Image (cartoon, rainbow, N blue to C red):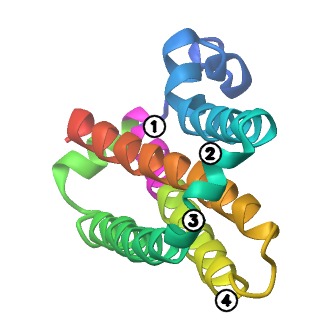
Amino acid sequence: MEFQGLPEPDRPVKFRRFFLPEVFWERSTPYLLGVGTLIGLLILKRFFPEFLIRFKPSFPKLFDGTLAFSSIMAGFASTLIGILFSIRETRTIKKLELTGSFGTLKLYLCEAAFCNIILSICCIAANCSFGYFPYGCSICGIIVMSLFVSAVSFVIRAINIMAKLL
């Protein structure tokens, strides 16, 4: 007998399911942390401009370290996606597909990989423009740091959900 799925009234509507407290916080935490970091650093830049100027000589090191980290994490998340597709016929993955958790896991891993790739591109652009835009460097540093916080939380969320599911 083939699996027919749940009857229509029992199926959760994705829009309503997103706003359940546990799902909402799980899905939106990386975004909120990134935006919160961005707002916090912009407030610091506005009211304490000497705070970021003191760190200006170390910005190239910050960009290099962040680039290395984000490249490794993007590779890690991409490799996990490949591994998930290669073990698709196992009992655990079939169970995840039946419960609908496999799509969530794929989404979380893809978001982690995508955010780290964007962070890598921003780090490369910020490092290349470091000498040319003396005032824009602190803005680049703020953007890179807020993206870094989001990227780390995306990876932690993906690893956490993978540990829960498997």
Give the x, y percent position of residue 89.
Answer: 24, 62
Q: Are marks 4 and 3 in contact (CB under 8 Å)?
A: no
Task: Specify the label residue 51 is tagged with.
Answer: 2
Which residue is labeled 1 in the image?
100
Residue 48, picture quadrant: top right
Q: Give the camera-side residue of 61 and 94.
A: 61
- The majority secondary structure of the magenta stretch comes to helix
Query: Is 54 left or right of 160, judged from the image as shown?
Result: right
Q: Are marks 4 and 1 in contact (CB under 8 Å)?
A: no
Amino acid type for the residue under numbered disc 4:
Cys
Residue 107 visible, this angle: no
- Per the rendered image, the range of residues in magenta is 99-109
Residue 14, picture quadrant: top right
Q: CA distance from mark 4 to mark 3?
A: 21 Å
Q: Which mark sits nearer the N-terminus, 4 or 3? A: 3
Q: CA distance from mark 4 to mark 1?
A: 43 Å
Which secondary structure lies at badge 2? Answer: helix
Q: Are marks 2 and 1 in contact (CB under 8 Å)?
A: no
Give the x, y percent position of residue 60.
Answer: 53, 77
Which residue is labeled 4 in the image?
128
Q: Which mark sits nearer the N-terminus, 2 or 3? A: 2
Category of crowding for the residue at label 4, using alpha-carbon neighbours closer than 10 angstroms: few (below 14), some (14–19), many (at least 20): few
Q: CA distance from mark 3 to mark 1?
A: 22 Å
Q: Which mark sits nearer the N-terminus, 2 or 4? A: 2
Q: Please, is residue 35 above or below residue 134 in the view?
A: above
Task: Specify the label residue 114 is tagged with.
Answer: 3
Amino acid type for the residue under numbered disc 2:
Phe
Residue 156 visible, this angle: yes
